[in-house]
Image (spheres, helix red, strand yellow):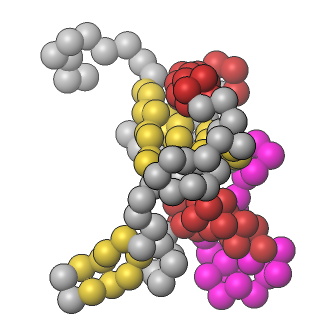
Amino acid sequence: MRRSEQTGHTVKLLHIDSSILDGNSASRALTAGIVARWRRAMPELQVLHRDLAGTHALSHLDGASLAKSDAAEAARCARVMEDFLAADVVVIGAPMYNFGIPSQLKAWIDRIAVAGKTFRYTADGPVGLAGGKRVILAIAQGGVHALGDAS
């Protein structure tokens, strides 16, 4: 594996897709293009793809998830956190549905926004603990909008 010249470790990229539109998704096309560009620039890049609307779907956060009372759910949450923390680069496909991100992506964010793991509270507000990552958002929205059209 190619090593980062600055850190001496294998560069890991986490590729997150959340669109429900499979092959008709603009955000999936964008993330695929971004990841392909990284692979061309760094052929031995280690890539981990997670399809939140498919094989890697997560349930919505609930009390049992927070309490870690379900062992299988706790293991899924731990895997999501491990994937995120291990990544040097995170490419996130974020389509816009009904003026917001898909609930699949929100469920993933709920699993990585954990006090004491990825941020901590201070007197001045929250402070990130997962620094040093490069995060690339591929945001797409449907519909046809004319320049200056507010509708």
Q: Which residues are magenta?
A: 53-74
Of residues 130 and 68, the one nearer the viewer is 130
32 to the left or right of 90: right
Q: Residue at x 57, y 55 (%)?
A: 8
Q: Residue at x 44, y 39 (%)?
A: 137
Q: Position of residue 105 (x, y in %)?
A: 56, 50
Q: Does residue 35 lie above or below 114 as drawn?
A: above
For residue 81, which quarter of the picture?
A: bottom right
Q: Residue at x 47, y 84 (%)?
A: 116
Q: Residue at x 46, y 52 (%)?
A: 6
Q: Does residue 53 lie above or below 110 as drawn?
A: above
Q: Is residue 35 visible?
A: no
Of residues 40 and 16, the one nearer the viewer is 40
55 to the left or right of 86: right
Q: Position of residue 64 (x, y in %)?
A: 69, 82
On whether residue 19 falls in the magenta region, the answer is: no
